[in-house]
Image (cartoon, rainbow, N blue to C red):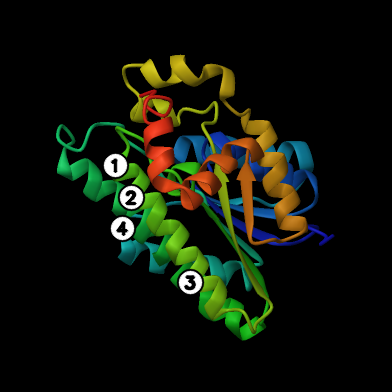
Amino acid sequence: MRELKNKVVVITGASSGIGEKVALKAAQLGAKPVLIARSVDKLVALSDQIKEKFGTTCTYYQLDVGDFVKVTETFQRIIQEEKTIDILINNAGFGVFDTFYEANFSDIEKMFEVNVLGLMACTKAVLPLMMDHNSGHIINIASQAGKLATPKSSGYSASKHAVLGFTNSLRLELGKTNIAVSAVNPGPIETNFFNIADKSGTYVKNVQQFMLKSDYVADRIIGLMQKPKRELNLPKWMNMGSVLYNLFPRVADKLTGNILNRK
C-alpha cells in the first residue's frame, strides 16, 4: 500500500461530487490536494474546509479544462509551486442525455472538449514531470458508459469510449516506466452530474435504486491511489454487462435493448 502522506494530488472537477470527496479523504490521509475547477467560490470553500479540518495546505486554481492554453499555463504554475505532482485525477467532465437525432451538436463538441481533450491536455501537461521523476499515477475517471453504450447517450458514451481508448494506449506506452495509469468506470452516482445530464429527471427516477454513493466511490478511488491497478469498475456486477456484450454483442443487443433504455 502506498502512503499518501505529503503526496501532491491534483484533482480536476474538484469543486463538487466525487472530486470534492476525494480531496477531503486524501487530505485526511495527509496528502496535499491541489484543487482545479471552474467555480472559484466552491474551491475557496473547500480549500478553507480542508485547512481547518486537517491543517493541510490546499491550493486551488480556477480552470476550464476545455481551454487548452490555460491548462498548460495552470499546470506550469502548479509545478513551479509544488515542484512535483504525484497523482493526477482527471475527474472533470459532464454529460447531456439526448437521442443523437435531437442532440445539439454544440453539446457533443463541448463534451469532447472537456471529457476527452481536456483530460488529454491535463495529462500532457504533467507527463514530462512524471517522466523526469520516473514516478506518478494518472487516474482517468471514465464511465461504464464508455464500455457499454446505451440509448440517448451517444455523445457522452462516445466521449467516454475515447477516454478508455486513450487510457489503455497510454498505459501501454508507459509500461516500462514506474508511472501507473488507471481508469475508473463507475455506474450512475448520486451527484449533481444529473442536473445537466438528465434535466427531465427520468433517468434518475428509473435508476435511483442502483445509484452509487459518492462517498463509496471516493473511498474506492483512495484505495486505487494507495494500490494502483489497471481498472476500477463500480459496481462489479454492472461491469459484467460490458463483458457479456463484448462476448455476445448481437445477442446482448436483442436482450438488453429495452433494459438499458432508462433515460
Circle 1 residue: 154
What residue is disc 4 on? Answer: 67
Circle 4 or circle 3, nearest the eye: 3
**Residue 250 point in image, percent of width and height:** 38, 44
Local packing at callout 3 (Cα closer than 10 Å; few below 14, some 14-19, many 20+) is few
Q: How many numbered discs sit on the rendered protein?
A: 4
Q: Residue at x 32, y 37 (%)?
A: 153
Callouts 2 and 4 close, C-beta under 8 Å: no
Select label 2 or label 4 by which is in front: 2
Above or below for 110 versus 226: above
Q: Label 4 neighbourhood size at 10 Å, few (<14), some (14-19), many (20+)? A: some
State left or right for residue 213 relative to residue 100: right
The residues bearing labels 1 and 4 have C-alpha atoms spaced at a distance of 24 Å
Q: Secondary structure at mark 2?
A: helix
Residue 72: x %, y % from top left: 40, 69
The residue wearing badge 2 is 158
- Whether pointer 2 and pointer 1 mark residues with C-beta atoms closer than 8 Å, the reply is yes
Q: Nearer the viewer, residue 229 or 260?
A: 260
Q: Earlier in the sequence, mark 2 or mark 3?
A: 2
Q: First in sequence: mark 2 or mark 4?
A: 4
Residue at x 52% of width, y 75% of height: 127
**Residue 230, x across and y down, in percent:** 64, 61
Q: Nearer the viewer, mark 1 or mark 4?
A: 1
Check disc 2: other Cα within 10 Å, few if <14, some if 14-19, many if 20+: some
Name the residue rendered at 59%, 82% in the picture.
Answer: 131
Q: Is residue 19 visible?
A: no
Q: Earlier in the sequence, mark 4 or mark 3?
A: 4
